Image (cartoon, helix red, strand yellow):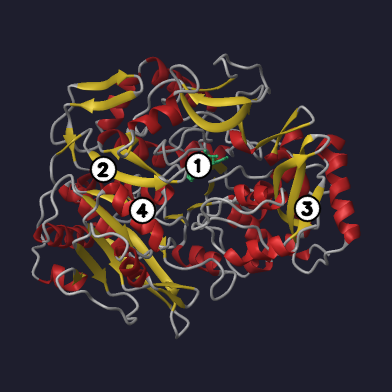
Amino acid sequence: MTQAKGAAETSSTMESILDEHRHFPPSKVFSNGAHIKSIEQYEAMHKRSIDEPETFWAEIADQLHWFKKWDQVLDWRLPDAKWFVGGSTNICYNCIDRQIDAGLGNHTAIIWESEPLENGQPEVRKLTYYDLRREVSRFANGLKKLGVQKGDVVTIYMPMIPELAIAMLACARIGAVHSIIFGGFSASAIRDRVEDGKSKIVITADGGWRRGKIVPLKDNVDEALTLTDLVETVVVYERCKNNIVMADGRDHWWHEVISTASEHCPAEEMASEDLLFILYTSGSTGKPKGIMHTTGGYMVYTYLTSRYTFDLHETKPDGNGGAENGDVYWCTADIGWITGHSYIIYGLLPNRVPTLMYEGAPDFPEKDRFWDIIERHQVTKFYTAPTAIRAFMKWGREWIDKHDISSLKVLGTVGEPINPEAWMWYHKVIGNEKCPIVDTWWQTETGGHMLTPLPGATTTTPGSCTRPFFGIDAAVVNSEGEEVSTNEGGILVVRKPWPSMLRGIYGNRERFLETYWSKIEGCYTAGDGARKDENGNFWIMGRIDDVIVVAGHNLGTMEVESALVSHEAVAEAAVVGFPHDIKGTGIAAFVTLVGGIEETDELKAQVRNHVAKELGPISKPDKLRFTPALPKTRSGKIMRRLLRDIAAGREITGDITTLEDKSIVEKLQQNSD
Ligand code: WT7
């Protein structure tokens, strides 16, 4: 009955993170070829990175190109860190020109693939470093002609096409600050971000393809610009040839902007602490926060985390006139999120490994799209999110079995805690039990990976993001800031500065201090709860505001969700608290079933009892509701805030503009129990 889930992957035993004791050491063969080969090597390097951060990071920064070396590696005045003070560099130069200087101009920098077109074939474009430098330089010169200057905020709202990468790199080349808005957002989100960033120029496309339909990006921009009069210039890339209106004087076609632009554009010398980009992230309350990242530290940290977390190796001559094939890397995120900024573009290109960009959806035209791409491009390193992995599980392994995905070597996950069952499925079905899994915990604010396995060194355990990266001094503390004991839950903090930490919230110093620096004296607070086990591995317990206290007991929503998903009929689950007469807070579970399974009251009772059996009666959901899908943001995060309102029988309050499919909420409201 659970065909869709794959027989070998389900087990009747508890697969919740509470009693997870499976360990997966890297294979000898993998470790031998890896940059970081053993846990001893990791520990020695980590110790050094904490004891002598300045020499550690200077050595790494030295691997990249600087116009002028720094005078001081770190100037730390809590909560403000300045890295590589006095140094100047350009991240676009390091992404492109540095490779050309090393004689690699003809190597592939970006592989791009579209959704399949009408003939069933996708369009594929490969850009070498030479191609990229030419296109970036032309567009950078075009921007200059349009009046864009160093320090100006440029809003980018584009589909996942190479021109998105070109636009962001062009900004970085001339020192303009980009503010990228995910192409799935609506007009009001564009208006808010444009106004917050005081941005006078927007770069967009007529449309983008998604499941064979056109997303009307330019129309959305037009609508946003009726709500604000800040924007003077719009540049439009012609992608879908859909009908749009070009406003005279304001709107310019991309191809016209570059038609007379020179192919030569020197990379601007940027001070290490010059602003590189703003990226908006939602908080639990209020309007989105414009997270600020600067140049030097962000560049060095994303370069190193990319290199070590994914164990990246470039194509090298083999000494016999041939070449030893290097990695092909694919991160399935959109560039509109921090994952795309750091781990499609900025951290990847300086590592001289081709980075793959895909424009479309994972299930269009069929549910094997990703495996087809991996097979055809011989992808070696693959980075995706738990929500995607759970969708693949639900669709069933027959989609994977159609393809040879044996090129894969490392599998990454990011965005939310991964339940052990999804981890095991990823390990067995996608990784064929030979690919280390790197569960990377980090945030928009941290710029790069904070807690993560290193694939050649770390023994992994399903559900744990394991150990801190180099330079990261992470701890789990109580509300007084004291470290809690082993396996006790607490607040996750970082006690020392790291190169890619956020430098502020754009235009809002107060909120920056309040959100990240006011909770625990001297520490950055991430807003996540965690525990650390006897092996020094960290376990993220979800956002602090996702913790539910039932009858005086702290329950991580994640634990209950893991227990739910360990029932063979359950595909995905979300758990929230709701006001309960007796317990104070009750547990409400929203559950989607594995394809083909019928929703019955018996099954409801069975699933609730299953949780009680696995976790104890206190964790048994008081309410359980089946739903065809969970309400998610466009980045795939379950909107628990909405579910909390629904569970409490309240009117839905607050912003739902980031919701992927609004009809789910209507269905859930109608269908209350
Ligand atoms: C929040 C940050 C970092 C890029 C994507 C999300 C959660 C992220 C993990 C993980 C458990 C995770 C945390 C964090 N999160 N990665 N591997 N395990 N939780 O970026 O939108 O800034 O969200 O995502 O709760 O605080 P973001």
Q: Tell me which label, 2 or 4, sits earlier in the chain.
A: 4
Indicate the position of residue 245 as horizontal and vertical percent values. Answer: 27, 78
Q: For marks 2 and 4, give the CA distance.
A: 20 Å
Q: Nearer the viewer, mark 2 or mark 4?
A: 4
Q: Earlier in the sequence, mark 3 or mark 4?
A: 3
Q: Amino acid at mark 1?
A: Thr
Instruction: Point out the frontmost of discs 2 and 3.
Output: 2
* SS state under label 1: loop
Q: CA distance from mark 1 to mark 4?
A: 15 Å
Compared across the picture, whether 106 is left or right of 15 comes to: left
Mark closest to the chain's N terminus, 2 or 3? 3
Q: Amino acid at mark 3?
A: Thr
The residue that appears at 34% across and 30% down in the rendered structure is: 499
Q: Which mark is drawn over residue 10? A: 3
Residue that sits furthest to the right in the current view? 602
Task: Decide: few, some or many residues near mark 3? Use Cα within 10 Å; few <14, some 14-19, many ≥20.
Answer: some
Q: Is residue 360 left or right of residue 269?
A: right
Q: Is residue 545 above or below residue 331?
A: above
Q: Single out the residue that lies furthest toward the bottom.
A: 119
Mark 4 highlights which residue? 192
Visible in this render: residue 106?
no
Q: Quadrant of the C terminus?
A: bottom right
Residue bearing mark 1: 285
The answer to whether 429 appears left or right of 60 in the picture is right
Can residue 530 be seen? Answer: yes
Q: Which mark is residue 276?
A: 2
Tell me residue 28's x, y (percent).
57, 37
**First in sequence: mark 1 vs mark 3:** 3
Residue at 43% across, 37% down: 308
